[in-house]
Amino acid sequence: MLNKIINNKLFPTLYCIVVCLISFIGFYSNTNIGLLLLLIIGTLSIIFLKDLKYVIPCFLYFIFGNRNGTALNQIDIPLVIMGGAFLVIMVGFIIKQKINLKKSKSWLGFFLMGIFTLIPICWAKLIDSDSSMLYFMYFADIGYFLLYLIFSNGIKKPDLNFLALIMTFLGILLAAECIMVSYSLKDVFGNVFVTWYYLGWGLCNEAGIMMLVCLPFVFYLFSLSDKIYKYILYLITILFIVVGILLTGSRGATLFGALEIAALFIATMFISKNRKKTLIFTACLFAIAIIFAIIKFDYVKEKIQEAVDGIFASSFSDNGRFSLYKDACRVWNENFKTRLFGSGFVSEIKPGNTALGMQENVVIVYHSTFFQTLAMSGIFGIITLFIHLYQKYKRLFKLSSTFLILIIIGYFVVDLYGLIDNTYHMYYYMITLTIIMGMIDAHLYTEEEKDINITV
């Protein structure tokens, strides 16, 4: 009976819808109950379905449905107990499965990043005892490496379409959160395009980054569509995520999002399953949008002006980024060992602009993948980052052309964006990336095994 349900072609979609709804309702009303339900579903999926691919939506939506952030005083005891049970069962499942590095072809880059991020802990100096929790951040990249091993080995029946569905609904979840929070702040700021706000798990601009990660997967499903209702659903989804990106108030997410969407639409026109139908249908929708803009010109003009005023209120100022880049170079260049291995998650107290205004805060991020890596783990860290990037892109070229072209656009745009904002070494991005790469490597291993069996 259970196998019959799982094998139903509607099951993956319905499963993602249910988990996504639980996460959003929990985010909206009671985060602890929402997170508890996600842990229960994730735990049961390991026990009964015995495949970590069904854990992925629970795991990801748990992270991005957490409105409490890291406030330990807001975590209920049942949530702690269920979280412990989930980890024990997940670890037990992986021990039973055993780790096979042949399934984890991208392990070296993750492993080296973890090692070279950890080394500076030997000479790192924190400002005071209140900052001691930051020591855990030195182990974060090792954690991502282990997470990658777990998912690349624990996914028994990899399915790229299921991964695309998971990421699509993650994009919907993030957009819904941004729409809800920005509108709740409208009366306070007088504009829905609020510059900065917290979502609990992270800042609004970080939600913008993650929606850019999700968009290529929506376009992938759109390119596979062969029915009108699917075209409509996926185009509405894309529009919904675009609204979410705009309401992050992030200049970077808006500009890089425009670049990504343009590239994805152009690519989709050439690689979709039914190119002629896709071209005609998309052209018709754009024509309708243009006609609407002409008819409602004043209204559209007003909303565009409102968006521009809100998102680009500070024009194209660097918001202190150049100062942070100089700080990164300074802490990297302190001595010979920091030049080679970096200074780790540097903890210096200095005034900074936060979502709560200007205040003294601990500097641990430098708003750039390059400068973040350089400051944290030095020249060796930069080398290991390039090893990881090589493996990340190389594995894509073994996949079908449709998946390759769309996902590589997403990889490239987000990595480009990462040169001026927080992507690598940030938990929300790294956990999602380890899962994506874990599913891809599990899929490629399965395909390679099929080829070997056919040959034999």
Image (spheres, rainbow, N blue to C red):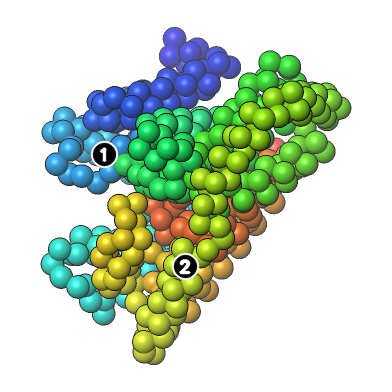
Vertical comparison of 391 with 81: above or below: below
* Label 1 crowd bin: few (<14), some (14–19), many (20+), radius 10 Å: some
Vertical comparison of 400 with 28: above or below: below
Amino acid at circle 1 = Asn
* Label 2 crowd bin: few (<14), some (14–19), many (20+), radius 10 Å: some
Q: Is residue 261 at least partly visible in the picture?
A: yes
Q: Secondary structure at mark 1?
A: loop
Q: Nearer the viewer, residue 77 or 73?
A: 73
Image quarter hosting the N terminus: top left
Image quarter hosting the C terminus: top right
Kindly give the residue lying farthest to the bottom in the view shown: 336
Q: Nearer the viewer, residue 81 or 24?
A: 24
Q: Nearer the viewer, residue 213 or 382?
A: 213
C-alpha span from label 2 to label 1: 28 Å
Upstream in sequence: badge 2 or badge 1 = 1
Counting from the top left corner in percent of width and height, residue 36 is at: 26, 28
Amino acid at circle 2 = Arg
Residue at (26, 26) in percent of width and height? 30
Left or right for 26, reference 258: left
Counting from the top left corner in percent of width and height, residue 321 is at: 47, 67
Counting from the top left corner in percent of width and height, residue 305 is at: 60, 41
Tell me the residue that label 1 is attached to: 68
Kindly give the residue lying farthest to the front in the view shown: 298
Vertical comparison of 254 with 118: above or below: above
| Residue 139 occupies quadrant | bottom left
Using the image, tell me which numbered label, if any, was put on residue 180: none
Residue at (39, 40) in percent of width and height? 189
Left or right for 146, reference 306: left
Left or right for 32, reference 391: left
Tell me the residue that label 2 is attached to: 321
Q: Nearer the viewer, residue 285 or 448?
A: 285
Residue at (32, 75) in percent of width and height? 120
